[in-house]
Image (cartoon, rainbow, N blue to C red):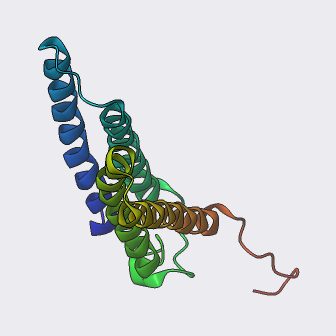
Amino acid sequence: MPIEPRLFIKTAMVYLALTFLAGVILAVAEALQHPLPPVIAIEHGHAGFVGWLVNVVIGVALWMFPLDTQRFPESKGRYPVRAVMAAYLALNIGLPLRLISEPWVQLADNPIASTVLILSALLQFAAIAIVGYIVWLRIKAPARHAPGVR
């Protein structure tokens, strides 16, 4: 398996562990009659969904989708490496920024936090747009040639 899909999947495993740890903390706080603010539960879900599920899905998709060795020789037909790394960085910089800034906005209503939250959302959207483009390139039908022309 190439390094790029492994990077997504390993990052997903870190988020899986962190999500379960956050779940334990939420449950213990609730059991001790000291519930955390509701925004923390939202971030817990976002870390699990985007951090674990989206990262693992992207990693597996990059590994499993059909190859196009003519279009992407540098990665043995898998994808444009720079685009994949841009998506990885956008997703995995955007997510921690959200996990920090969203509670900050909810609890303190700080304009800096609001700006960081907007940036985090844009980074995550950019990541998914890049991945969509990469996947589209891998699943679209090859160009047809005129009969007898190769």
- Position above or below: 90 against 50: below
The quadrant of the image that shows the C terminus is bottom right
Instruction: Identify the residue at image location x=46%, y=70%.
Output: 78
- Position above or below: 74 against 76: below
Q: Is residue 115 left or right of residue 30?
A: right
Viewer-proximal residue among 14 and 61: 14
- Position above or below: 32 against 132: above
Coordinates of residue 108 in the picture (x, y in percent): 33, 50
Which quadrant of the structure image shows residue 37? Answer: top left
Instruction: Identify the residue at image location x=87%, y=82%.
Output: 146
Q: Is residue 146 left or right of residue 45?
A: right
Viewer-proximal residue among 42 and 52: 42
| Residue at the right extreme of this rendering | 147
Which quadrant of the structure image shows residue 135? Answer: bottom right
Viewer-proximal residue among 44 and 135: 44
Instruction: Identify the residue at image location x=57%, y=81%.
Output: 71
